[in-house]
Image: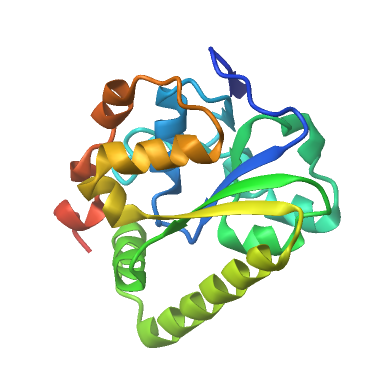
Amino acid sequence: MINMVDIKMQLDSNINYIVSGLERSGTSMIMQILEAGDAPVAYDNFRLPDKYNPNGYYELENGKIISRIIKGTFLLHNYLGRFIKITAYGLKFLPKGKYKIIYLQRDIDEVLSSMEKMMGKQDEEKEHTKTSFIWLNNLVKNYIKSRNDIEVIFVNYNRILLKKAVQARRIYNFIDYMDISINEIVAIIDEKLNRESIDLPL
């Protein structure tokens, strides 16, 4: 079942709104921030919360919509005016349209460490993985900045944890909506959810 959360806020119904970034970069946290401010978000219950994302993954189709975007079978128009989550790689295949994208940035070493903990083992080719992730991150960022049908804001994961109110207002300013209870939004940003601060066994 797809959760279509739309309580108070109305966004532009001509725009596809997307939260993106590399895996383990904080995209689920951004979806929580948006939901807390009554922004319309869409996700399903296919992937349940776990110790790595205790508040949920906020994904559609277990995060496997990228293959459908590549094939042109994912109906983006069904989600106009609502935020959905698409990881960085999928942005390369967005059809022409009108988009607003919140793109998460996080230190690559933190991303890789979080992925290792989630997999339960060390990456034996970590340096190669790091190089590949840096390449992909730069490629996607340059690509979305080059498209005239995309507006993007780059948000740093650690700055959100350090400057909660400032960063939350910045996000909501990007979507042209400031009639929010900033205290309620800040309250759900829990620095303890930083996977690097939790002792999860490898």
* Residue at x-position 48% and y-position 75%: 133
* Residue at x-position 64% and y-position 26%: 11
Quarter of the figure with the C terminus: bottom left
Picture quadrant of residue 36: top left
How far across and how far down the image is residue 129, in percent? Answer: 44, 80
> Does residue 4 lie above or below 20 as drawn?
above
- Count up the numbered dots: 0
How far across and how far down the image is residue 67, in percent? Answer: 73, 56
Picture quadrant of residue 71: bottom right
> Does residue 174 lie above or below 79 as drawn?
below
Picture quadrant of residue 7: top right
Q: Report the colour scheme.
A: rainbow
Task: Spot the residue most to the top.
Answer: 7
> Does residue 113 lie above or below 71 as drawn?
below
> Does residue 126 lie above or below 117 as drawn?
below
Q: Nearer the viewer, residue 58 or 121?
A: 58
Quarter of the figure with the N terminus: top right
How far across and how far down the image is residue 138, in percent? Answer: 54, 75
Tell me, yes or no, if residue 82 can be seen here.
yes
* Residue at x-position 69% and y-position 53%: 150
Q: Nearer the viewer, residue 35 or 173?
A: 173
Tell me, yes or no, if residue 48 can be seen here.
no
* Residue at x-position 40% and y-position 57%: 25
Q: Nearer the viewer, residue 135 or 168?
A: 168
In the image, is 18 to the left or to the right of 187?
right
